[in-house]
Amino acid sequence: MSPSDRWRRPHSYHHGNLKEVLLEAARKLIEQYGPAGFSLTEAARLAGVSPAAPYRHFRDRDALLAEVARSGFERFAARLDKAWNNGIPTPLSAFEHLGRAYLAFAREEPASYTVMFETGLAEAPREPMPAAERAFDVLQQAATALCRQLPESERPPIKLMSLHIWAISHGVATLFAQGELQAQKIPMNPEEILESAMLIYLKGLGILTDTKQAPSS
Amino acid sequence: MSPSDRWRRPHSYHHGNLKEVLLEAARKLIEQYGPAGFSLTEAARLAGVSPAAPYRHFRDRDALLAEVARSGFERFAARLDKAWNNGIPTPLSAFEHLGRAYLAFAREEPASYTVMFETGLAEAPREPMPAAERAFDVLQQAATALCRQLPESERPPIKLMSLHIWAISHGVATLFAQGELQAQKIPMNPEEILESAMLIYLKGLGILTDTKQAPSS
DNA sequence: CTTTCATGTAAAAGCCCTTTACATGAGTCC
DNA sequence: GGACTCATGTAAAGGGCTTTTACATGAAAG
């Protein structure tokens, strides 16, 4: 019962913070061994509890992975929203921040990102996953703001444009920003690839003109 | 020893075609349960052999998955190459075929596509995977051909452009063309999303002009 | 026919997932 | 303070999967 015992971990029968610790352990293990190599038992071991303990907090292994995905989308949406910052100071500069934030999340939380988008992990999440929709909303806001300078007749369907932006970002993130194994043969970093693609895409929409930088204001 | 025994399967001690049958079973199971849910034992059961039999053909579970990926890349590269067809009749029409072939493969062989691109499944394949490079080469050929009409000073770096094309295709394929779960809220099919994105991108490069269709020859 | 060897099986060790019955102890009510 | 309650932990066990090892089978070659 020395104070140091309370300091590190109460070493009591009840853990007190097991759910969060398990999620953290899961992310670490997935990052290391992939979603397939992750095991509930080993996560429990990392948390210092028995293999049955996680079942007090998650229905089963899939439920834990689903929670990794859900909480990942929360942080993802928050981060994208903060990077976009309502298009301030300019939609274009904010859009660049947004792209970098997207890639930064995929690189810093590869386990979360993988579980969030991996197909066939938890088959079908019944619920529409609100945080995922909030993240997509940020992209949609950005698309809207970027289009505002266009005459209405030339504006693309916002939803379609948002899907384009999402697909490009996701493609770059999964192909080049995760695991950095691919980084060998490829002469550029993911940020450069994403930004150059986006500049070309925006030019194709008429949002950007020939100069690399937009005519600010 | 009725003739029907020989008809369905030789029902002999030696299977005769086990390796291919196991790969086929693996693809079916992965398609159904995801790469995590796939089990060697169940693949063996589908093939009608004991759980130890697969080890005569694959070092371990990961080696089987690696072979699913490798053979997938073979068919992928062949299909892309055939669709591109050396840019005949026109680079633009061939490019459209290429995009459709990309999505068709992802939809028709979701298991292969997933294993081919899933991060953290087999950690790091030591070998550079020649078929994967052949597939990328097709994209690079297409990029080169599309750029030929541009004055040299306006041509983008071919490698970078190829990475853009790859990222967009991969993004659309993984987000919208696999599992078709997402198809609920999204008003368009993957082909439309990919083609519209590509048209905008090519316009941004100056390869396409305002008209939706290129001025054919 | 006999030998050879690729390809199959059976059995077993070890790990993981999950359930069930039981243990612990923090907070609550008298 | 003392007893109760219930969330949260453990232990044990069943069943499945992976992989290894020793053995079996039979097609092809000499």
Image (cartoon, coloured by chain):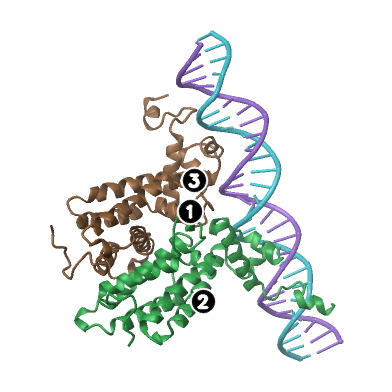
Chain colours: A green, B brown, C cyan, D purple
Residue at (63, 72) in percent of width and height: A19
Vertical order, A136 against B145 (above or below): below
Measure how far apart labels 2 and 3 are at the Cα level: 36 Å
Side of B204 where D24 appears, left or right = right
Badge nearest the viewer, 1 or 3: 3
Real-space Cα separation, disc 2 to disc 1, in angstroms: 26 Å
| Residue sitting at x 13%, y 59% | B216
Left-right relation of C1 to B106? right
Labels 1 & 3 near each other (Cβ < 8 A): no
Question: Is A184 in front, or is B121?
Answer: A184
Residue B168, how many percent across, how many down?
A: 34, 63
- Amino acid type, residue under disc 3 in the picture: Glu
Same subunit, tags 2 and 3: no
Q: Which residue is mark 2?
A: A75
* Residue A125 seen: no
| Quarter the C terminus of chain B occupies | bottom left
As shown in the figure, which amino acid type bears the numbered disc 2? Arg
Q: Circle 1 sits on which residue?
A: B35
Q: Residues within 10 Å of mark 1 (few under 14, many from 20)?
A: many
Picture quadrant where residue A59 is located: bottom right
What element does badge 3 sit on? loop
Query: Which x, y percent locates residue A118?
Result: 46, 62
Residue C9's image quarter?
top right
Q: Which residue is mark 3?
A: B127
